[in-house]
Image (cartoon, rainbow, N blue to C red):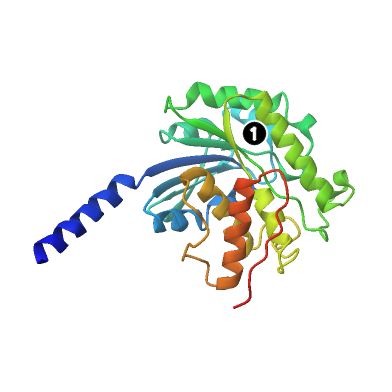
Amino acid sequence: MKKQILFLIICLSVSFSAQAKIIKILAIGNSFSADAIEQYLYELAAEGGDSLVIGNAYRAGQGFESHWKVAEQNKANFKYHKIVGGKNTNQRKTLLECIQDEEWDYITFQQASQDSGDYATYEPWLTQLLEYVKQYARNPKVKYALHRTWAYSQSSDHRGFHKYGKDQLQMFKKIVEATNLSKKQHKEFCMIIPAGTAIQNGRSSMIGDNFNRDGYHLSLGLGRYTAACTWLEKITKQKAVGKKFRPKDVSEEEALIAQKAAHYAVRHPDVITEIKIKKK
């Protein structure tokens, strides 16, 4: 009997190891990519047995045009945050150095938040940036993706909010339209990571419009956790709903709302899904 139990444990261990993956992700973005992937994504993936190597090449407040011009001149103006084994390091590098640091499985792109719903600001800069990355990426099987960021909170005083009439729903709709059009124009993009849809879903819950810390960046706990759950589902295919890991200042009830907001964003990325949970 003991031998049978030991054999079963070994088989389960081997099966778990076979399913576990090492996934390497590089985001080219700004503080919004820092909000989405630097805090909780590694821990969420690890709970399901996947080990992530996460790189974030970002320049605060910058988007496609600015990134391309800096990359073209090969300036070491990118802050390169890298998470390996759950530990974060910070260096200043050129975009080329970030691209070639690993054989990335995924490389993602995002527009500056104030321009994320204005497709006219995407081109020709995104095309040039994408061609540059394709030229130097080390992994021939690398997959490219777009990160759909979130609309500002309705009370935001960000000057870029005026572009959308200071209307959160209008900004959300424009971001959906612009990212969908960009994906249609660039066949290289295998997916859109709908973090912005997840945040909008979460706002439909009893939590309301309380996912930001300053009107546009995500709150350090719940907001960032919601975005990380979205990336988890799209990149690793693990389900966010039911995850035990959550930030210390996020309640079990809030975590479930975040998980469901992310899950339904992945299932229905272009529309807002109202999130309801039963009171215990």
Specify whether 145 is left or right of 172. left
Whether residue 157 is situated above or below residue 100 in the rendered picture? below
Res 35 seen here: no
Q: Nearer the viewer, residue 171 or 242?
A: 242
- Image position, residue 198 (x, y; %): 65, 53
Q: Which residue is mark 1?
A: 67
Q: Residue at x 64, y 29 (%)?
A: 68
- Image position, residue 58 (x, y; %): 59, 43
Q: Residue at x 79, y 36 (%)?
A: 118
Q: Nearer the viewer, residue 70 or 110?
A: 110
Whether residue 49 is situated above or below residue 213 in the rendered picture? above
- Image position, residue 228 (x, y; %): 55, 54
**Residue reaching furthest bottom?**
280
- Image position, residue 139 (x, y; %): 42, 28
**Residue reaching furthest right?**
165
Specify whether 122 is left or right of 96. right
User: Looking at the figure, which quarter contains the C terminus?
Assistant: bottom right
| Secondary element type, mark 1 | helix
Q: Residue at x 44, y 35 (%)?
A: 104
User: Looking at the figure, which quarter contains the N terminus?
Assistant: bottom left
| Amino acid type, callout 1 | His
